[in-house]
Image (tube, helix red, strand yellow):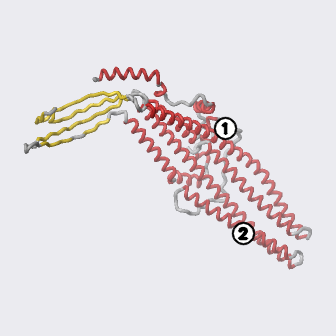
Amino acid sequence: MNIKKISHIAIVVISFVALTGCNIYKKFEMPQDSALASEYAEAKAAAIDSTAFGNLQWQQVFTDPMLVDLINQALTNNTNLQNAKLNIDIAHAQLKGAKLSYLPSVALAPNGAGTSYAGSDMAWTYQIPLAVSWEIDIFGKLLNTKRGAQAAVLQSEAYHQAVRSQIIGAVANCYYSIATLERQLLLNRETAELWRQSVEVMRNLKEAGRVNEAAVVQSSANYYSILGSITDIEVALHEANNTMSLLLNVAPQKWSISPDAEFNAPQIVRESIPMRELAARPDVRAAEQSLATAYYATNQARAAFYPGLNITANGGFTNLLGSVITNPGDFFIQLAGSLTAPLFSRGANIARLEATKAQQQQALNNFEYTLLSASAEVSDAMTIYQKADEKGGYVALQVENLAKSVEYTQELLTLGTSTYLEVLTAQQSLLAAQMAQISCEHTKAQAIINLYQSLGGGR
């Protein structure tokens, strides 16, 4: 069979495939029968809003110099991010291999042998062949393999961005958690000193006959209670410092973060986030590329029903021509083409195609769930931020009034018109409100950080 005949056969087969299997050559597109996927495709095609919160550079969102330094350290040292970068390198290597499969394979296999019969002289033969084999990709097998590898590269890049965003958000959250715990610890220690002084006041009042022993022991119990609370905060602070150390991939240590560190978050007043901002999330993009990979795997399964066309060539130098040994040797060349059609493996191919179709549907389901989950995360973060901001105003008023309550009840106790139980209740309520105020500020900061991360921020 010569090259001309092979070409004629290839043209006939290609025409048949074009009529029966055009999907084999088609690039991946979002399914039109899914309303959610169609909406996503339209939003993705829209222009990117560079001013959107999730599209801001992380240095524009986090401006605290110490936090900026810690984030840079984490982006340099974090093991998870390094592994994500290696996944990109692996995907690029696999894509390179898929592209190189278009080229012919070449093999050199020199061999030699000696033969002697009935004591005759040894007859030596040798061959230095060079074998070339080239698969002509007229049925899309290599094409879909390459496209699947390209989708895997994009998926690994999206995963890398997701890990990067998570690390930035985790460092920022940990930073302000440590600042919050330091602030709570400072408040509790200052309050403990006031309550220790209150114990002394109760003892003096008892000696003066103004209160009884019950007031002394109640004030002492109140003092020991806050000392116990301080130990809990110290444990939480120790754990938060260790978490920061792990994020930066360094030995556990204490991080000197100021209790006055506050996150001046940009005001978010929108009620909802448009689909095009959700489409920028790296986990959504990764799920999209996973669906594309499944699509190309289905195309590969379809391509398995069609013949494979291979052209082979062998050439080299040998001294064995037929059954005659000649010295010196001579060059030889052989050229062949083969068209291999699957006959008895049709059942296996059908099963494989059914499996890949099911896997493609799974990938679509996972993509839609990822998109819905992203929307829920953004909605939760926005609601938490808005309600924490609203709650902060109420708690501030509560602290203001409780501070006056403590002052008034202490004055009344001195005048003998109030009991220590009322003073104790006012003090405990004030401390609880002050702790709630600190926690509320942290919740606001955490919500805005989570919103930035949930929008794929961290470029």
Placement of the N terminus among the 4 image quadrants = top left
Residue behind mark 1:
273
Residue that sits furthest to the right in the current view: 417
Tell me which residue sits at (66%, 47%) in the image.
Answer: 448
- The amino acid type of the residue labelled 2 equals Leu
* Residue 215 quadrant: bottom right
Mark-to-mark CA distance, 1 and 2: 45 Å
Which of disc 2 and disc 1 is earlier in sequence? 2
Tell me the residue that label 2 is attached to: 227
Residue at x-position 70% and y-position 50%? 444
Point out residue 207 in the picture as x, y percentages from the top left corner.
86, 79
Mark 1 Cα shell of 10 Å, populated few (<14), some (14-19), many (≥20): some
Q: Is residue 71 left or right of residue 318?
A: right
At mark 1, the secondary structure is: loop
Residue type, label 1: Ile
- Residue furthest left in the image: 120
